[in-house]
Image (cartoon, rainbow, N blue to C red):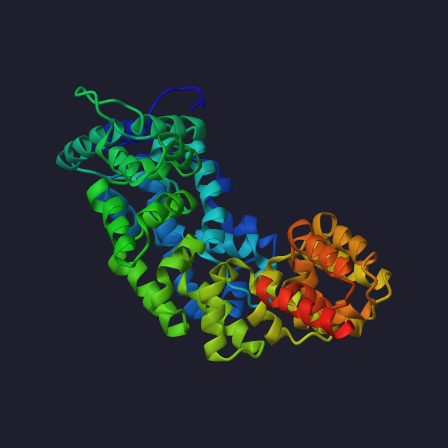
Amino acid sequence: MKASTVVTPAALLFVSRTTFPHSRTRVSFPQKVFFCQAKYSDSGIEGKFSLRVVSPTLLAAEKEEAKAVLTLFLKKQGLSNVVAARTINKSDAFVDHLVSRLHSIHKSRYLVGRELSTLEIREALIPYLETLLEEFGGILVDVVENFPGPPVEERSEENVQNQTVIETSVASVSPSVAPDSRKLRALARVSDISPTGKLPSHIVYLVDLGMELEAIREVIRKFPAFAYYSLEGKIKPVVEFLLDLGVPKSDIPTILTKRPQLCGISLTENLIPTMAFLEDLGVDKRQWAKVIYRFPPLLTYSRQKLKATVDFLYEMGLSAENVGKVLTRCPNIISYSVEDKLRPTAEYFRSLEVDVAVLLHRSPQTFGLSIEANLKPVTEFFLERGYSLRDIATMISRYGALYTFSLPDNLISKWGFFLTMDYPRSELVKFPQYFGYSLEDRIKPRYEIMRKCGVKLLLNQLLSLSEEDFNKLLKKKMEKNA
């Protein structure tokens, strides 16, 4: 079927199942789809690899994730919950194929024992499912159910008539196959005015919460499924749950904009159990409102992903109390890949003889930076200015946020002014927090006042004291000099 043909997937499915209601129907498809084991054996991913490298527990978890992705995809095409669930129950072989595809795409990560996040699994599988949809259109369900062989259907006239009712209703709301068309259809759902001249109820509810209409449209452009979430069944229960946790109403629009997927997750089966799991890991239950606002995606990660990050923190030497503090203050550390980001960063700082546990506790956000683009340039910056690796290790240990500052926008300009302040370079080793103060609002004004008073304060005294204590110390120094 050409891509330009305007036929919904559901309508195609109906035609394929009703053209020969009394006969056994076999449809021919390219072998490349139905012999995927042979195709992927070239990449080294075969049954032996999966059984040898992936634990049974992880394999079972991945199958469940694959089923969830497939279910969501089928429902996005307009299938009802009943039809989607029935298809999943008949598709064990296809689900196994999806898991094998994960192993193929992420072979190197499995070889080092690295588990995939829910987001990574979705990003790997959904484009593949979209490719199959474009190739097979409305008979995709048959392809999935009969994998790896060609679709074979045998139905009674009564079953076909029942299916007609289901698929006809689906066809009326099924999004178009093309991604742009799906977005347009989704946007239409949040823009159409009813005969009474009002917006749909779920849009009115979101606007009342403080979301701008254009902001809602932007969410739909990025995540079209949000347009199909029901008000009473999905959006409102999650919003009320967040309000009950103490999240201010004014923060709800920001949270939903950052992670609209929250409204698609079951409260009883996912959100609440995930929160309990995180509380057991040390997240301060009294801080949930702040934690969710800081990083809404936290509650959408799988438990395997959450546990992998926490296990890493323990491995680095953090205590249970400090693990809880890190997760509470910097929940987005969960989004960092353990093997691709956290561990290499830890090894880099260890090469500088930095206490990694202390740095993780004080400045976990540092571990989200690129080693090549951020960390190494800062190290080279200080080495080129005469500091030793031991000096740099001392500075980062005393001020964990040091590496989070931009070279051109922060370090270079403040270093240039420091050279005019008549302090020894060792003063920065003692007080690297200097780089955390505003050059125009704090450093220059304080230094000018001290210079006019004709006294000399330590860099720490110059910048860290309150205005009152700073003036008292200046007065005391001036009296002593007099």
Relative to the observer, which residue lies in front, 6 or 23?
6
User: Taking 277 as reference, is 418 above or below it?
Assistant: above
Residue visible at 25% across and 57% down in the picture? 244
Relative to the observer, which residue lies in front, 54 or 81?
81
Question: Quick one: quadrant of the C terminus?
Answer: bottom right
User: Taking 183 as reference, is 145 above or below it?
Assistant: below
Which of the 4 image quadrants contains residue 481? bottom right
User: Taking 426 as reference, is 138 above or below it?
Assistant: above
The answer to whether 322 appears left or right of 71 in the picture is right
The reply to whether residue 347 is in sight is no
Relative to the observer, which residue lies in front, 142 or 458?
458
Q: Position of residue 428 (x, y in %)?
A: 76, 67
Q: Position of residue 2 (x, y in %)?
A: 45, 22
The answer to whether 93 appears left or right of 41 in the picture is left
The answer to whether 470 appears left or right of 52 in the picture is right
The reply to whether residue 330 is in sight is yes
Q: Position of residue 130 (x, y in %)?
A: 44, 37
User: Taking 447 as reference, is 218 above or below it?
Assistant: above
Q: Position of residue 121 (x, y in %)?
A: 47, 53
The answer to whether 415 appears left or right of 2 in the picture is right
Work out which residue is located at the far front of the displayed protein and give it.
Answer: 482
Residue visible at 28% across and 23% down in the picture? 192
Question: Quick one: quadrant of the N terminus?
Answer: top left
Relative to the observer, which residue lies in front, 20 or 78?
78
